[in-house]
Image (spheres, rainbow, N blue to C red):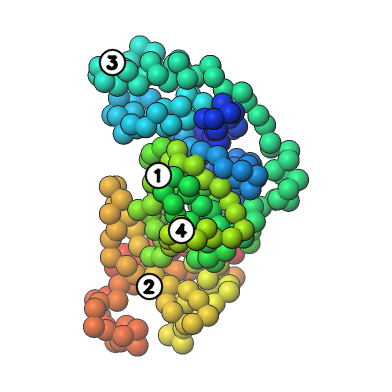
Amino acid sequence: MGQLFTACAYDIKTKTSCVLCVDKFHANCYSFSGGVLSMHYLLRQKPWRIMWGGNYVAGNKNLAKFSRNEDLQGISAYLDYEYFERKDYDCHIMEKVKLIGDYRHQWKQIDVWDEAENYFDKSVKYKGYLVNHTKKMAIDLADYHRQSKSMSNTGVYYAIDLIPVLTETGDGTPMALYEGISTDTTEELAGTWCGDELQIVDELPDDYKLINCCFAEVWNRANYCNINFGVSDDGYLLKDDSKNLYEAVKLNIVGKRGEARNLKVEKIEKKIRYIPELIPKGMSIQDVSEATDLTTKKYSKSQK
C-alpha cells in the first residue's frame, strides 16, 4: 500500500491544529494540492509548526529520530494512538509513545480548506518569504518558484511545493523525485524543517539567513524549460535565458546522485524525446557529435 501522509499545522501554545489527509506523498505535494493550499494559507496568517507526517513514523527506528517534545506533539496531532499499540518498542522509545498518547487529546481542530481555496484560486502564490523562526532561516518564494516551476505533459504549469518536502517526516520525497531531478535541486534539505515554527512574510527579517531551495522533477521541469527557453544550436535543452544547459541526474536508492547529463532534444512528428547524454570533463558541447562513446542507455520522455 505504501506510506500515507497527513498535512499538519499545529500551535503548541494555543493547542490548535489543522490536520488534512493527503494520501501518498507524490499524490498531493504540488502547488495546486488542497493540503498545500491550506498550509500556505495558515502560514500567511501567523506562525505555525508544520509537519508533513507519514504513518511510518510510528516504527521503532523512525520514531527514534525525533527527540524534541515539539515534534512528539506534532506527531500526536495527526497520528492516532492506535498506530502505536502492540508494537515491540525499545524502552526509551516507549517513553516517547506514552508522551504522544498524553498529547493526543489536547488538540482543538480547525478546518481552513474552503478559506484557502477562495484565497488562492487554484494555486498558491509564490511571493514573499517562507521563514523558519526556529532556525532563523528564510527562502525567497519567487526564487524557489523560478527554479522549480514545471509543466506536465498535458500543459499544466505547477511546482512541487517546498513545504511538504522541507517538513516531511521521512521517505516521502524520493517518491516525488523517483525518475530523477534537475541538478539545481536541493534534495539534501528534505525533512530538515520538520516540526519547526514557520511563517510566510512579505519582508525578509534582518537577522535571518537566506538559503537557496529548489525541488524539480527531471522530466516536467524539462518540459517547462523546453517551452520557455528552447534548445541550443546543437540541440541541447537550455535551462534559462542566459543559454545555460539544463542538467539532470538520477538518485540511487540511498539518495546519492549519479553523473549529471545534458538532454538532447529530438522532435518526432508531434512528440518530443529527451535523450540524456554524459558530457565528459574537458569536452565542450560542440564535441559531442564527434565522440563515439558518450551516450549511455537512452531514457526518453515524450511530450504531446
Residue in view at x 45 percent, y 61 percent:
210
User: What x and y, as percent, mark residue 31?
Assistant: 59, 51
Nearer the N terminus, badge 2 or badge 1? 1
When asked about the image quadrant of residue 275, the answer is bottom left
At 70% across and 50% down in the image, what residue appears?
Answer: 120
Q: Quadrant of the C terminus?
A: bottom right
Residue 44 pos. (x, y %): 63, 48
Query: Is label 2 or label 4 in front?
Result: 4
Tag in front: 3 or 4: 4
**Secondary structure under the numbered disc 1 in the rendered image:** loop
Q: Is residue 274 left or right of residue 15?
A: left
The residue pinned by badge 1 equals: 191
Labels 3 and 4: the sequence-earlier one: 3
**Closer to the observer: label 1 or label 3?**
1
* Amino acid type indicated by mark 4: Asp
Q: Residues within 10 Å of mark 3 (few under 14, many from 20)?
A: few
Q: Residue at x 39, y 58 (%)?
A: 186
Q: Earlier in the sequence, mark 1 or mark 3?
A: 3
**How far is disc 3 from disc 2 in space, using C-alphas?**
48 Å
Q: Which residue is mark 4?
A: 207
What is the C-alpha distance between the residues marked 3 and 4?
Answer: 45 Å
* Residue at 49% over, 42% down: 197
Is 275 situated above or below 206?
below
Q: Which mark is residue 88?
A: 3
Position of residue 58 relative to residue 151, above or below, is above
- In the foreground, 216 or 235: 216
Q: Which disc number belongs to residue 262?
A: 2
- In this view, the residue farthest toward the right is 118
Q: Amino acid at mark 3?
A: Asp
Amino acid residing under circle 1: Gly
Q: Position of residue 100 (x, y in %)?
A: 42, 20
